[in-house]
């Protein structure tokens, strides 16, 4: 009987390790397609957690963005703002899913998401945000955004339709 219990514990442990390995592998973010292909469009496959991620920068300081269609502005944390050497900006209060948060707004910044860029954007700095930035509407509205269950496409708008 003791041998069966040991075997059961070993099998449960192996199954747990297998589940952990598969879970970690599915958590990786798929690669962005379209940069460097000259089409003015990128395709973001959905990540394992259901979000769309891409690497970018604010004034050259690298940041990992999650596409957030509910965010009004591109928003970054304090560390990224410091790395980007952003000026102090204007105090602001943000209404977030977690309640009201004090931060600041810094106008006239350059934002890059994958190979797409936008100048003259106001960037919000939210002290509690951490390492992941939010790619908000002030960036997204410059592009056509088409989302399906499996991918998100960002396409340059024709110059005549840019807001």
Image (tube, helix red, strand yellow):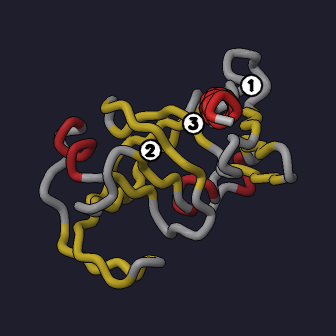
Give the quarter of the figure containing the C terminus: bottom right
- Residue 102 coordinates in the image, percent (x, y): 23, 76
**Which residue appears at 17% of the width and 43% of the height?**
82
Question: Is residue 98 in view from this perspective?
Answer: yes
Q: Name the residue under label 1.
A: 33
Q: Distance between the residues labelled 2 and 3?
A: 18 Å
On screen, residue 125 above or below 55: below
Mark 2 is surrounded, within 10 Å at the Cα level, by few (under 14), some (14 to 19) or many (20 or more) other residues, namely few
The numbered mark, 2 or 3, whose residue comes first in the sequence reads 3
Q: Which of 38 and 1 is in front in this view?
A: 1
Q: In which quarter of the image is residue 99?
A: bottom left
The numbered mark, 1 or 2, whose residue comes first in the sequence reads 1
Mark 2 falls on what kind of element? Answer: strand
**Which residue appears at 57% of the width and 62% of the height?**
137
Mark 3 falls on what kind of element? Answer: strand
Q: Name the residue under label 3.
A: 54
On screen, residue 140 above or below 17: below
Q: How far apart are marks 1 and 2 (CA)?
A: 23 Å
User: What mark, if any, has residue 119 been given in the picture?
Assistant: 2
- Residue 19 coordinates in the image, percent (x, y): 68, 35
Residue 91 appears left or right of 43 = left
Does the CB distance between marks 1 and 2 fall below 8 Å? no
Q: How far apart are marks 1 and 3 (CA)?
A: 11 Å
Q: Which of 64 and 50 is in front in this view?
A: 50
Mark 1 is surrounded, within 10 Å at the Cα level, by few (under 14), some (14 to 19) or many (20 or more) other residues, namely some
**Which residue appears at 46% of the width and 38% of the height?**
64
- Residue 98 coordinates in the image, percent (x, y): 41, 78
Q: In which quarter of the image is residue 5?
A: top right
Q: Quadrant of residue 69?
A: bottom right
């Amino acid at each position: 009987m003791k041998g069966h219990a040991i075997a059961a514990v070993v099998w449960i442990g192996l199954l747990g390790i297998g589940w952990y390995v598969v879970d970690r592998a599915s958590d990786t973010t798929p690669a962005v397609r379209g940069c460097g292909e000259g089409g003015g469009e990128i395709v973001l496959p959905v990540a394992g957690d259901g979000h769309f991620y891409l690497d970018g920068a604010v004034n050259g300081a690298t940041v990992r963005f999650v596409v957030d269609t509910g965010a009004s502005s591109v928003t970054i944390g304090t560390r990224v703002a410091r790395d980007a050497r952003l000026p102090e900006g204007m105090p602001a209060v943000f209404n977030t899913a977690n309640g009201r948060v004090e931060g600041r707004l810094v106008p006239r910044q350059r934002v890059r998401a994958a190979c797409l860029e936008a100048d003259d954007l106001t960037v919000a700095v939210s002290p509690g945000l951490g390492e992941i930035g939010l790619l908000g509407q002030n960036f997204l509205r410059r592009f056509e955004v088409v989302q399906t269950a499996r991918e998100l496409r960002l396409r340059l708008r024709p110059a005549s339709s840019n807001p």
